[in-house]
Amino acid sequence: MDTMETVAINESRGIERIVEGVATSDGAGVKLTRVLAGQLQQRLDPFLMLDAFASENPDDYIAGFPDHPHRGFETVTYMLDGHMRHRDSAGHEGLLESGGVQWMTAGRGVIHSEIPEQVDGLMEGFQLWLNLPAQRKMGEPWYRDFTSDAIPEYVTPQGVTVRVIAGSSNGVAGAVTREVTEPLYLDIHAPAGTEFSTALPAAHNAFIYVYRGAVTVGGTKVDSRRMGILSNTPDANNVSIRADEAARLILIAGKPLKEPIVQYGPFVMNTQQEIYQALNDFRNGHFA
Ligand code: CO
């Protein structure tokens, strides 16, 4: 082994592509930016969707997301600021508040609603869809709320605060772990002039989304309200993120499933036949 190989072990990933996202609305008219959808589902396998929402105008969020079904994947809602009431057909109910996370495994199917419990002020956060492996798509639904206090956190010597929602980072285990997709979900608060690094298996697909300030990864700047897709390089098994100005961002990574993805709205399965089955089961009341 020569010395170059030794050096390469700590190589950081770079930015392959910057994504702006598309302004849209969902539910009963909630305004949001869809950052991950369509073609990016293959590139960022096992992630199926990322919506970013941020508004101080109640007209943008007040109607929320009335009853709707899901099958075949997991939804992870991270509330930076705001209050949202969740109810589902499996009997779960909870209030998601600032800094909290709601993790729902739809499995074979749930019907749920997500309705704001505030009439004014800022509502800001993210909803991520994480795919389930084929053999778990028809498993039992599962649901948990994590209050802000229940999200493990650490502070680096440089003063970067890291909230570990899923996976583990620099020896700190997060609130949720998943075996097959091994998701990592960090919320990183970086003061100006700091650099943050965390291990990231080279084969895992990964991206950042900056929601305050701007950061630089491998010489590429990623501005606020932008996703940066991290390149997969065989020797790069970590990521280094530099904040020349104060910045906040989420870092999300996971192990690709490499299975067919067939989506029809809120159902994500492996074949068209399974989608027909989902529609039939929903119409026949088998989700409740
Ligand atoms: Co939903």
Image (tube, helix red, strand yellow):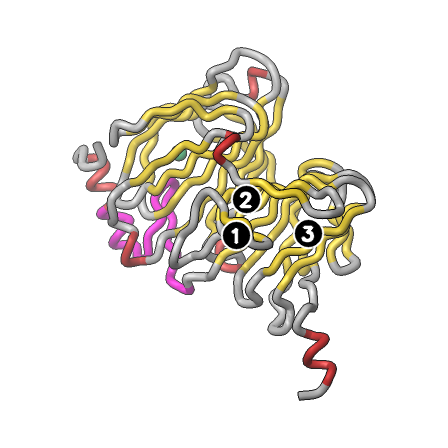
- Secondary structure under badge 3? strand
| Disc number placed over residue 18 in the picture, else none | 3
Mark nearest the camera among 1 and 3 is 1
User: Residue 46 at what x, y percent from top left?
Assistant: 45, 55
User: Which residue, given by chain and number where applicable, does mark 2 sit on?
Assistant: 164
Report crowding for label 1: few under 14, some 14 to 19, many 20 or more residues within 10 A (C-alpha): many
Quadrant for ligand 1 reads: top left
Amino acid at dot 3: Ile
Q: Which of 85 and 179 is in front in this view?
A: 179
> Can you give x and y, in whole percent of width and height, for residue 279 in the image?
25, 41
Residue 168: mark: 1
- Rendered-image quadrant of the C terminus: top left
Q: Quadrant where the N terminus lies?
A: bottom right
Q: Label 1: state its secondary structure.
A: strand
| Circle 2 Cα neighbour tier, 10 Å, few/some/many (<14 / 14–19 / ≥20) | many
Would residue 205 be visible to someone looking at this image?
Answer: yes
Which amino acid is tagged 2?
Val
Residue at x-position 66% and y-position 51%: 228
- Tags 1 and 2 in contact by the CB under 8 Å rule? yes
From what the image shows, is residue 213 above or below residue 67? below
The answer to whether residue 22 is left or right of residue 219 is left
Q: Which residues fall within the magenta stretch?
A: 258-277
Q: Where is residue 12 in the image (x, y as percent from the top left)?
A: 69, 64
